[in-house]
Amino acid sequence: MQIAANLVPMTPSIDQLGRIIANVAAPAFLLGAVAAFISVLASRINRVVDRAQFLHGITDDDASKAYLKADIPRLRRRAALLNRSLFCAVLSAICTALIVIVAFVSALLQLNHEYGVAILFIVSLLTFCVSLVDLARETRIALHDNDLRT
């Protein structure tokens, strides 16, 4: 029994846990922001898909709405940008969650975690920035002359 007790590292003190919780507060807020952003992206993707389904339902003999079918390639481009943006946002959320996990596990095992957390945080922010850039690109092509016709 003594051998097993020696194999298990000492658990972190309350002060250590307090410092870890303070250190993971920023990633926790980032995780909440990324989750809200993912919700926005999913909503935009749904709108693009609904619009594309509507346009595919227009028959060729409906002359009053046939011109709208020219919008399908633009919707495909928007969907591709939103899909990549969503992927990058999810990747950012996973990296952010890993920051919190690594911080607590390394405290439990009494390991230095600063470099690993820093790398994960950089990767998380970079993927979040790529996601934001893709959203910006999508919003630039979102408004079109066909959207303004009544």
Image (cartoon, rainbow, N blue to C red):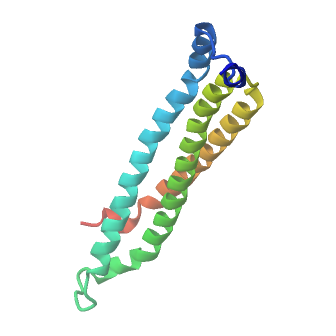
- Furthest residue to the top? 15
The quarter of the picture where the C terminus appears is: bottom left
Q: Nearer the viewer, residue 59 or 102?
A: 102
Q: Residue drawn at (29%, 83%), measured in percent from left and top?
A: 66
Residue 6 lies, in percent from the top left, at 72, 20
Q: Residue at x 72, y 23 (%)?
A: 3
Closer-to-camera residue (125/25): 25
Foreground pick, 135 / 24:
24
Quadrant of the drawing holding the N terminus? top right
Is 96 displayed left or right of 116 in the figure? left
In the rendered view, tell whether residue 62 sits above or below residue 98: below
Percent position of residue 31, x then y = 51, 35
Q: Quadrant of residue 69?
A: bottom left
Residue under the point 33% across and 81% down: 67
* Image location (x, y in percent) of residue 108: 64, 23
> In terms of image quadrants, where is residue 61?
bottom left
